[in-house]
Amino acid sequence: MERGETDDCSADEMLSPASESQDSNAHPIPQTAVNKILGRLTVQEAIASQAYRAITPQEITPQEITPQEITPRVAHPHRLPPSSFPASSASPPPPSPAPPELLLQGDPFHISLLCQGVEVWNRWRAEHPHLRPNLRGAYLNHRDLHWADLHDADLRFAFLFYSDLSEADLQNASLLGADLIHANLEAADLRGATLCGAYLSYANLNRADLRYTDLRGAFLYGAH
């Protein structure tokens, strides 16, 4: 064969299976080397080089994509159905514990004493002027607490839904997070009281003394 004819041979003819069969002792040329000679790119190489040309199905052969190059897609564990979890998997973590304020309850004696009526309660307060009542988390819904002496009382997270607290003494009382929805606080003394995060929706605050009252974060929708 003449030299000119050799130069005209294409790379495909030089690397074709027919040319390889002529010399049985020749080592096979790796497919990656063939790709480089022919200017071909694998899918991963095309993405890595940010090649924007279209890769036709004819260019993607089984030899170009090996099983090692294919990464199996694993579904997110939170999106799997319950039956997909292995039996030995750890149980989900328990819910977060409640805040300490919700776990601490009021003094049962103080709560029962207040439930006996305002007259009994006010007499006991007069006999123990330096004792701070612990009414935290007490259920006092729909209670008649008119004229009740509740100054300095701990009423955090107490339930006072629809309670009558008109003209009650609530000076410096702590009503953090208390439920006072629809409560009657007309002419109540709330000077220095803490009502942060309290629910005062539709509460009656007519003529209530709110000097120095902390109302940060309180819900006052419909209060009047």
Image (cartoon, rainbow, N blue to C red):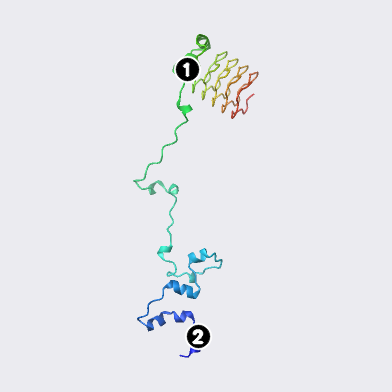
Give whichever of 6, 201 is nearer the camera: 6
Q: Amino acid at mark 2?
A: Asp
Q: Nearer the viewer, residue 186 or 52?
A: 52
Instruction: Identify the element where label 1 is drawn.
Output: helix
- Which amino acid does the dot numbered 1 rest on? Ile
- Residue drawn at x 36%, y 48% as measured from the top left: 86
Specify which label sits upstream in the sequence, 2 or 1.
2
Q: Position of residue 213 (x, y in %)?
A: 61, 23
- Residue 214 percent location from the top left of the image: 60, 25
**Is 191 on the left-hand or right-hand side of 78?**
right
Q: Residue furthest bottom?
A: 2
How many marks do you count on the picture?
2
Q: Is residue 216 above or below residue 16?
A: above
* Distance in Å between CA atoms under marks 2 and 1: 106 Å
Q: Is residue 88 found left or right of 223 in the rendered image?
A: left
> Which residue is depicted at the point 49% across and 84% down?
9
Between 222 and 195, the one lying in front of the other is 195
- The residue mark sitting in front, 2 or 1, is 2
The residue to which callout 1 is attached is: 111
Quarter the N terminus occupies: bottom left
Circle 2 SS class: helix
Is 2 above or below relative to 152?
below
The residue identified by callout 2 is 7
Residue 169 screen position, x and y as percent: 58, 15
